[in-house]
Image (cartoon, helix red, strand yellow):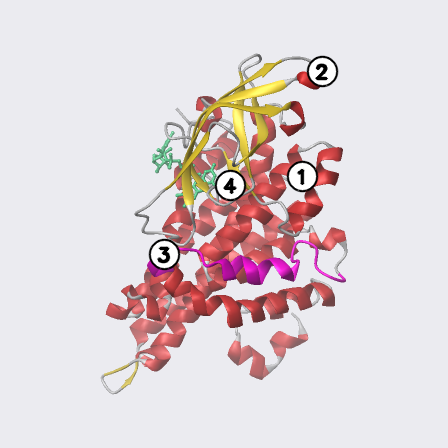
């Protein structure tokens, strides 16, 4: 136990050690903690004031990435490359973001998680050396385009977007045709990392397609009731031509895509943990202020029982995401591990946000109390990057050796 947690005053403020900054002590360098503290300050001062209106109007204000990008959180000053790339640092960064707002965390993760991981794990050393510095400072923005209108959970076998190689040598090109759905950030990104099946060998490959390439048609999905400020899009690719150099050299089969997703699912588990911390904080704030029967809601036994369940969920979720990050930082990446974390923490998140919404009564469904946002946004997290059922089946297969997907 750290000295900070033994301190009676601090123990009263954070009795279960779920404040990420206390938690960082002894685990991250001073420079890394300073980077996260700077992030929290920026979120409080420049992002938090924007999030409810952004949700209401279903628009992501430019000020959000405008505030976050200059912080250089993918390569923070004074932090070693190894630590900046550690799963623990990246996880805590995600936790801090999601504790403020899930759409903001998801938008940031689209670049720093989905796109960057795809390029770093899928690109040749030369591609990574060229692109990663641009990605880190948002000089090149991108998205992860895997899901299709007719293939969500069964994308591994069902992926129908095709890529056909034409020409040889310097003239070699790929022609891509197909449809993608739900792609977060596609409307404004510079490039779309499109997964497509090679018509020659039937394997899944990945191509960096400029958003403005001829034959790309993008349409924003409207009418969402979760993650409203996050712009998701459907797009079609009709005879889109890209050079051989646009193909990520180390994505040569579904196995390579699954390895990328193994990393990404752990990021989503951290989002699901962070959003629970935000919902708990908002709920506690509310029940301390709101009075009924002549006393604050916080003093009622049944309200405290709900808060205790929420706190239990947050602590247990944090324990699980730390465990998965520590494994990844030891070089242990497994689809089953990250699926278990994503499945279980997102399930707990759904319960936590429902309890938060419950203790706020009628005000729990308006944006002002903050809990409504977490309540609605947890639904998207529950489904994206592997639904509850699909991640459970991955875990079940690891436990039993029997695949039960179909
Ligand atoms: C907000 C949001 C953002 C997203 N961002 C991206 C993105 O940036 N890039 C991207 O590529 N994708 C993205 N997605 C897509 C996401 O990953 C898919 O929605 C998800 O994989 C589920 O696919 P589906 O929605 O087509 O559901 P379906 O596959 O149609 O599933 C519907 C239901 O059936 C269940 N089901 C399916 N098969 C089985 C089975 N064998 N056994 C039991 N139950 C089963 C599912 O679990 C689910 O409950 C995003 C989705 C959302 C909602």
Task: Give the mark toward the camera: 1 or 2.
Answer: 2
Quadrant of picture, ligand 1:
top left
Q: Is residue 245 left or right of residue 365?
A: right
Residue that carries the numbered disc 1 in the rendered image: 120
Residue at (34%, 76%) from the top-left corner?
287
Residue that carries the numbered disc 2 in the rendered image: 169
Q: State the quadrant of the N terminus.
A: bottom right
Which mark sits nearer the N-terminus, 1 or 2?
1
Q: Please, what secondary structure does the residue beneath circle 3 have?
A: helix
6 versus 365 height, above or below = below
Q: State the quadrant of the C terminus.
A: top left
Q: Quadrant of residue 198?
A: top right
Q: Marks 2 and 4, Cα distance to the nearest angstrom?
A: 40 Å
Along the line of sight, which residue is nearer the eye, 14 or 137? Answer: 137
In the picture, the disc for residue 351 is 3
Q: Is mark 2 within 8 Å of ligand 1?
A: no
Task: Give the mark toward the camera: 3 or 2.
Answer: 2
135 versus 374 height, above or below = above
Q: Marks 4 and 1, Cα distance to the nearest angstrom?
A: 21 Å
Residue that carries the numbered disc 4 in the rendered image: 339
Q: Residues within 10 Å of mark 2 (few under 14, many from 20)?
A: few
Task: Give the mark toward the camera: 4 or 1.
Answer: 1
Confirm whether residue 309 shows in the render. Answer: no
Which mark sits nearer the N-terminus, 3 or 1?
1
Q: Residues within 10 Å of mark 1 (few under 14, many from 20)?
A: some
Q: Position of residue 314 (x, y in %)?
A: 47, 61
Residue at (35%, 75%) from the top-left corner?
286
16 versus 161 height, above or below = below
């Amino acid at each position: 136990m750290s000295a900070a947690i033994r301190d009676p005053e601090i123990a009263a403020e954070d009795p279960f050690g779920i404040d990420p900054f206390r938690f960082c002590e002894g685990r991250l360098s001073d420079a890394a903690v300073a980077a996260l503290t700077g992030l929290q300050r920026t979120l409080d001062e420049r992002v938090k004031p924007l999030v409810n209106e952004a949700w209401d109007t279903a628009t992501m204000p430019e000020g959000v990435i405008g505030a976050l990008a200059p912080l250089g959180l993918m390569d923070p000053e004074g932090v070693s490359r190894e630590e900046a790339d550690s799963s623990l640092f990246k996880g805590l960064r995600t936790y801090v973001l999601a504790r403020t707002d899930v759409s903001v965390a998801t938008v940031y993760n689209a670049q720093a998680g989905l796109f960057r991981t795809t390029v770093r794990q899928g690109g040749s050393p030369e591609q990574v050396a060229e692109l990663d510095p641009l990605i880190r400072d948002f000089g090149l923005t991108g998205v992860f385009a895997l899901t299709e209108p007719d293939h969500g959970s069964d994308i591994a076998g069902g992926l129908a977007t095709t890529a056909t190689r034409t020409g040889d040598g310097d003239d070699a090109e790929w022609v891509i045709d197909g449809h993608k759905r739900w792609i977060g950030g596609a409307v404004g990104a510079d490039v779309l990392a499109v997964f497509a099946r090679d018509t020659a060998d039937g394997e899944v490959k990945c191509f960096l397609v400029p958003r403005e390439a001829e034959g790309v048609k993008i349409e924003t999905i409207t009418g969402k009731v979760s993650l409203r400020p996050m712009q998701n899009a459907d797009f079609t690719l009709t005879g889109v031509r890209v050079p051989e150099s646009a193909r990520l050299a180390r994505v040569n089969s579904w196995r390579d895509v699954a390895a990328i997703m193994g990393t990404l699912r752990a990021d989503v588990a951290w989002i699901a943990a962070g959003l629970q911390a935000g919902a708990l904080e908002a709920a506690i704030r509310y029940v301390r202020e709101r009075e009924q029967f002549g006393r604050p809601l916080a003093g009622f036994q049944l309200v405290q029982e709900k808060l205790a369940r929420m706190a239990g969920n947050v602590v247990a979720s944090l324990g699980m995401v730390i465990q998965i990050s520590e494994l990844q930082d030891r070089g242990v990446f497994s689809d089953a591990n990250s699926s278990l974390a994503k499945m279980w923490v997102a399930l707990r998140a759904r319960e936590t946000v429902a309890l938060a919404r419950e203790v706020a009564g009628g005000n729990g469904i308006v944006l002002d109390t903050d809990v409504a946002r977490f309540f609605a946004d947890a639904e998207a997290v529950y489904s994206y990057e592997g639904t509850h059922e699909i991640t459970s089946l991955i875990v079940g297969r690891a436990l039993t050796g029997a695949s039960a997907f179909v």
